[in-house]
Amino acid sequence: MTSSTAAAVHDQHLGPMPEWNLADLYTAPDAPEVARDLAASAAEAKRLKDTYQGKFAAIATEGAKLAEAVMAYESLSDLMGKLGSYAGLLYAADQADPVRAKFYGDVSEKLTAIYTDLIFFELELNQIDDATLDAALTHKDLARYKPWFDDLRKEKPYQLDEKIERLFTEKGQTGRGAFNRLFSETMTGLRFDVAGEPAPLTLEPTLNLLSHADGKKRQAGAETLAKTLGDNIRLFALITNTLAKDKEISDRWRGFKDVADSRHLGNRVEAPVVDALVSSVRAAYPRLSHRYYAMKARWLGMDKLNHWDRNAPLPDKPERVIPWAEAQEMVLTAYKGFAPEMAGIAKDFFDKRWIDAPVRPGKSPGAFSASTVPSVHPYVMMNYQGKVRDVMTLAHELGHGVHQVLAAKQGPLLAPTPLTLAETASVFGEMLTFRKLLAETTSPKERKAMLAGKVEDMLNTVVRQIAFYTFERRVHEARRQGELTAEQLGAIWMEVQTESLGPSIDFKPGYEVFWTYIPHFINSPFYVYAYAFGDCLVNSLYGLYQESHPGFVGKYFDMLKAGGSKHHSELLAPFGLDARDPEFWNKGLRVLEGMIDELEKADQQS
């Protein structure tokens, strides 16, 4: 059974679940279209190089010719993105398959080789003087690309000459790219021999045990995670040290001063905005996570929560498995209540098998929505196990998918959204689903359990992700002074976790290695603050929606359709919101604080 042809997998508890159909990209790794498009990409990249290298200064005086060059570059970006997306999705569906791993590696190498012929393109566009470019951008065919050129100009101070850029790109395959792949394949290949389980588990089901109703199973899962990750700690420490040093070298050559400056630039967000977010969240730790976990410890009859009890369900929480079909209906109904168009787009993911839902050996853990390329459509990957959190994850990833579909009309150069805004639709979709389910809940116990679950999800999205960001900052700053031992990495992790989660969590031996399984630290340094950014932003937006802000739905869809063509300040302005204002972040945090207030009130009345 291949990911491109399988229709559905039936689980006796969850019902039929879809496996994605990748045929809209390519029908198979050995399909003739793959070889054809790789060859066409290489030929077109060479043509662009032969036609335009060293000539942009002259071409830029004619807007029509510059527009022709940019449109050809955009078209090639789409074709190469299609190839890369297919190889990546095929690999994600079964990272243990050596054939898929080889195909992914081969395609990545070929695309990197092709891209080296294109490095000159953006570098030389940035060498056009401002007056000439401004005049060219008045041409009707080029004007729509002005936001892309504006973003490109922001990269100019950090770009190197073409030979060095080529070297960085080519060495990336055997440097950062190779260590990313080593991490992914190592994590995928790990097996966790959990006491009481009939067979060793992969990472995802083992992590899932940490939210099991049975405390002994939670403890067994946590202890096995600690042992297995600890057994591999030297490898993970080496990967982390190598990638942190690799980033330091790149930052130094490019002229980035702060360890996170390159991420801020990529996110099109200013460092003071992120600093305001981080400061607001860290100042709120005592009012949020510290207060909630103290309350949860009382619910569980403990003085303190063991670290494996942090995500434990409430003692009287109704535990049931939610079949896939029911999860689908929950999400689509919630989306439809907001806007039928939103539900219609999301429905295509189910009807057209753009989702890969079941857990499988070798499958990449976690969940994501891959935007692929505007000429095709996104794909969603899940590891669905029937929990309420899985339903929320489905709503989250479909929000990404809807956003990516709506933004696709912007084209390959303008559709991609900075990470800080990429979480907007996903968190909003998740909130829509949660609010609908909560409104339909009449049992006080169920309502309390749902509120507690949502609070925990938001704590994981806001508090935990800012703690992750703090951990990354400390690791990368310390790495600039020399290599870090596994013990040093663990000590930083424990200090940050203690600060963020508070005195009501009892960190048992073994927790010091739990940093090792977080893929964002490896694949996307400093990505994590985008989750908190998106969550607080959505809380503010959702508050306006509840207050019947004039024209909210239309403004919201306009924001999603804009993709990456507008700065966050432009997108938030119609709502009267400003991310530079600390009150913006505090407003979002008060939504979470209000939910904890409600739980505390219910706790006092019971």
Image (cartoon, rainbow, N blue to C red):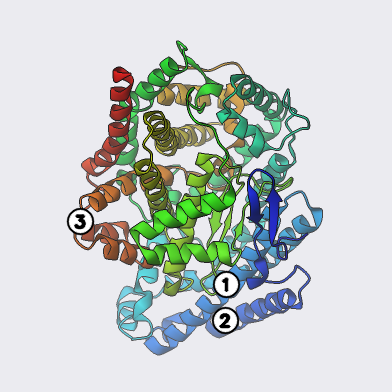
* Left or right position of 112 against 189: left
Kind of residue sitting beneath label 1: Leu
Can see residue 210? yes
Which image quarter: residue 49? Answer: bottom right
Q: Mark 1 points at which residue?
A: 118
Q: Name the residue under label 2.
A: 48
Question: 10 Å neighbourhood of mark 3: few (<14), some, or many (≥20)?
Answer: some
Q: Which of marks 3 and 1 is nearer the N terminus?
A: 1
- Element carrying mark 1: loop
Kind of residue sitting beneath label 3: His
- Give the total number of marks visible in the rendering: 3
- Element carrying mark 2: helix
Q: Earlier in the sequence, mark 1 or mark 2?
A: 2
Q: Mark 3 points at which residue?
A: 549
Q: Which of 202 and 472 is in front in this view?
A: 202
Mark 3 and mark 1: span between their CA atoms? 46 Å
Which image quarter: residue 119? Answer: bottom right
Q: x, y percentage for residue 9?
A: 70, 54
Q: Do the residues labelled 1 and 2 touch (CB within 8 Å)?
A: yes
Q: Which of 142 and 528 is in front in this view?
A: 528
Q: Are marks 3 and 1 in contact (CB under 8 Å)?
A: no
- Element carrying mark 3: loop
Q: Which of marks 3 and 2 is nearer the N terminus?
A: 2
Residue at point 72%, 79% (across, down): 36
